[in-house]
Image (spheres, rainbow, N blue to C red):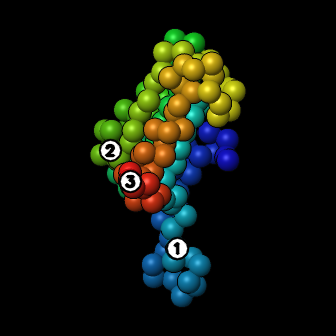
Amino acid sequence: MLPVVVAVQLLIRFDRGKPDTGDPIERQSCRPDFVGLVYAGWAPMDITAPKDAAPAFLTSAGSDDQFHARETVDFFNSLFKAGVQADLHIYAHGGHGGAINLRKGIPFGTWHLRFQDWMGDLGLLKRAVAE
C-alpha cells in the first residue's frame, strides 16, 4: 500500500503517455485503474482532480478523526466536480489507524466490505453468487 499522499499524487498527476513515440513503454500511461484512500490527509497541496482521474474509494472516521474526514470530503468534492466516479464513506466513530479489524463492532470496522462491493461494481472483483 502506498502512503495516501503518494496515492493522491498518482491519481491526479499521472503521466498520460506519449502515443507518438516509438518506445512502447513511453506510450503507456501510468494512470492507476483505481485508488482506495483510507484516512486521506496531506500537507497543503492542490488536490484538483482531472476529468480523466481513475475511480476512487474514500473512507475515514468522522467525529473521531475530523482532520482526515474533512480532507477526505474535500477530495471527494474535487473528484465529483471533475465527473470522476468516486464513493465516499465517512463513519461517525473509528479513530485513526487500527488497520482492518472489527473495531469492537462499530460500523467503521466493516469499511473493507464496502470497498469490496465498490470493486465489484467496477468489475474488478468477481461477485459471489448467492445460492
Front one among 27 and 108: 108
Front one among 12 and 68: 68
| Crowd around label 3: few <14 · some 14–19 · many ≥20 (10 Å) | few
Residue 81 x, y percent position in the rendering: 31, 38
SS at badge 1: loop
Task: Please tell me whether mark 1 or mark 3 is closer to you in this view.
Answer: 3
- Residue where numbered disc 1 is placed: 28
User: Do we see residue 47 in this rendering?
Assistant: no
Between the residue at mark 1 and the residue at mark 3, the CA separation in whole angstroms equals 41 Å
| Looking at the image, residue 8 lies above or below residue 100 | below
- Residue where numbered disc 3 is placed: 131
Identify residue type, mark 2. Ala
Residue 124 x, y percent position in the rendering: 46, 59
Residue ID at (45%, 82%): 20
Q: Pick whichever of labels 2 and 1 is earlier in the sequence.
A: 1
Q: Do the residues labelled 2 and 3 touch (CB within 8 Å)?
A: no
| Crowd around label 2: few <14 · some 14–19 · many ≥20 (10 Å) | some
Residue ID at (63%, 18%): 104
